[in-house]
């Protein structure tokens, strides 16, 4: 912890750690696969375009690019979600939220399933507003039934960034 940092680090739950790790790995694999594909396309652009070179670019460059996108896009999404969750848990303002709807998605990280929640956030000093979030459920799944109030943290810079503080 840095001396200028006013708040201690918040320990991440296992689901968020897994999501963060998944994001880092997916983004890294995507970058590693995209690098040779871009080099191949770059060299093709400046080389004499023979039929053999065109076949090589199509046979190697396109699959590498597609695999890079297949790994990279979900990796960046997971990494971004995990980092936003971490920031909101650390610097967020406590509030209450009413659960309006709960839907189970097909995604999961280890044993933690992703639940899509529609919440009505009830901040202390502002008007209530609705937000839809994806939440990594743990043992607290029964706590987020429609109609219940749950503790949340809200990002002061972006009120749409809400994390269930279970």
Image (cartoon, rainbow, N blue to C red):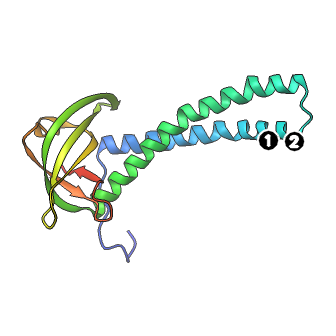
Residue 98 spot, x, y in % from top left: 11, 47
Q: Quadrant of the N terminus?
A: bottom left
Q: Quadrant of residue 112?
A: top left
Residue drawn at the location 38% of the way across and 48% of the way down: 82
Q: Is residue 126 above or below residue 100?
A: below
**Label 1 neighbourhood size at 10 Å, few (<14), some (14-19), many (20+)?**
few
Q: Residues within 10 Å of mark 2 (few under 14, many from 20)?
A: few
Q: Residue furthest bottom?
A: 4
The residue that disc 2 covers is 46
Q: Residue at x 75, y 25 (%)?
A: 58
Where disc 1 sits, the SS reads: helix
* Whole-percent x, y for residue 85 in the image: 33, 52
| Picture residue at 58% right of the left edge, 38% below the top | 30
Q: Is residue 76 left or right of residue 166?
A: right
In-front residue for pair 73/142: 73
Disc 2 secondary structure class: helix
Q: In this rendering, would 53 be left or right of 14?
A: right
Percent from the top left, x then y, of residue 148?
Answer: 7, 43
Side of 60 where 165 appears, left or right: left
Residues at marks 2 and 1, CA–CA distance in whole angstroms = 7 Å
Q: In the displayed structure, would residue 76 be above or below residue 88?
A: above
What percent of the width, then of the height, locates residue 99? 13, 43
- In the rendered view, tell whether residue 153 sits above or below residue 64: below
Name the residue tied to disc 1: 42
Residue 109, by quadrant, is: top left
Q: Marks 2 and 1: CB-CB under 8 Å?
A: yes
């Amino acid at each position: 912890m840095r001396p200028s940092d006013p708040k201690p680090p918040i320990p991440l739950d296992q689901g968020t750690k897994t999501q963060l790790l998944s994001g880092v790995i997916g983004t890294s694999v995507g970058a590693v696969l995209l690098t040779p594909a871009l080099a191949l396309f770059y060299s093709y652009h400046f080389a004499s375009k023979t039929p053999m070179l065109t076949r090589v670019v199509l046979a190697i460059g396109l699959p590498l690019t597609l695999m890079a996108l297949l790994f990279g896009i979900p990796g960046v999404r997971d990494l971004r979600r995990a980092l936003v969750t971490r920031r909101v848990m650390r610097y967020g303002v406590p509030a209450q939220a009413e659960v309006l709807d709960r839907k189970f998605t097909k995604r999961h990280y280890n044993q933690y399933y992703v639940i899509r929640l529609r919440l009505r956030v009830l901040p202390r000093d502002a008007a209530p507003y609705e937000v839809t979030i994806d939440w990594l459920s743990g043992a607290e799944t029964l706590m987020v039934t429609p109609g219940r109030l749950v503790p949340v943290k809200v990002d002061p810079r972006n009120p749409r960034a809400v994390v269930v503080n279970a």
